[in-house]
Amino acid sequence: MTLEWGYSENNGPNTWSNNYPEAAGPNQSPVNISSLDIKEIKAHKKLTWKYIAENTEYVMNPGYCWKVHVEGKGSDLSGGPLNGHYMIEQFHCHWGATDDQGSEHTINGKQYAGELHLVHWNTTKYGSFSEAAKHPDGLCVLGVFLKAGRKNQELDKIVRQLEQIQFKDQKVKLSSPLNPGSLLPEDSGYYTYQGSLTTPPCSECVIWIVFKEPIEVSHEQLQAFRNLKSYCKEGQCPCDDYKGHVQNNFRPTLPLGQREIKECIP
């Protein structure tokens, strides 16, 4: 029986291309954002976003992170490097076993404690998320670095629910409205490049926008992330590297190849 993909030695990122061939493609993410590769641009249109806090519905544990489902209607992401309008689908997080690692993208080799991903799809050109995910301009993911520091009050609306979704496939409604825009750093410039999803099937369909400034989260909040389990309540704890906990759920950086990273300064 084929093991599900994950982050331990026997099913981790090095093995993904066995079952998901696109994971070995030339435009994979994440990448190291190096000063040497950056081209500075002035965006013709400012990147703008609009979300409806009440539409942030529930948080679930898919076994490899926490993920928040959003009813996208009424949301809008446009401007910056984007042609057309994008609607939010979900947002989720990656983190490390310790506070000094966990982000997927790195800046000049530096890793942060975690990285939030807000996943949007192109509603101007495509009729559904799954259709959009087949095209290079189909998805846009906003990446936000998490730095260990002060408690994040907005993120705490999710953290408070994690006790109820300790096991894989559990989900719970958020008890108070959460505006995804409140998790984005204010007045931050960003990096943008063409890449892929960082989890299988690793489709090369993503315009990445990675904010330069991190947001702060507390050590205790990061610990709550690490307490999530990667297996179902009725299941058996896998004897993996992390004893069944969701830790170090980040994909290592991959070669930039012929791609260009653009830096947009506000």
Image (cartoon, rainbow, N blue to C red):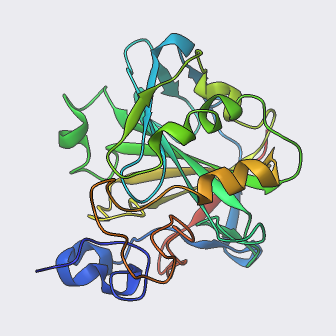
Q: Which residue is drawn at 24% across and 71% down?
A: 4
**Residue at 21% of width from left, 31% of height from top?**
128
Considering depth in this image, is 247 or 90 the residue closer to the camera?
247
Judged left or right of residue 139, residue 75 is: right
Give me the residue at 39% from left, 80% from top.
12
Judge whether residue 119 can be spotted in this image: yes
Q: Which quadrant of the figure contains the N terminus? A: bottom left
Q: Where is residue 193 in the image (x, y as percent from the top left)?
A: 53, 59
| 260 left or right, relative to 127 | right
Residue reaching furthest left?
1
Q: In this view, does 197 lie to the left or right of 222?
A: left
Residue 140 image-quadrant placement: top left
217 in relation to 260, above or below: above
Where residue 47 appears, as percent x and y from the top left, is 62, 31
Of residues 13 and 123, the one nearer the viewer is 13
Q: Is residue 264 visible?
A: no
**Residue 257 higher or lower than 245, as above or below:** below
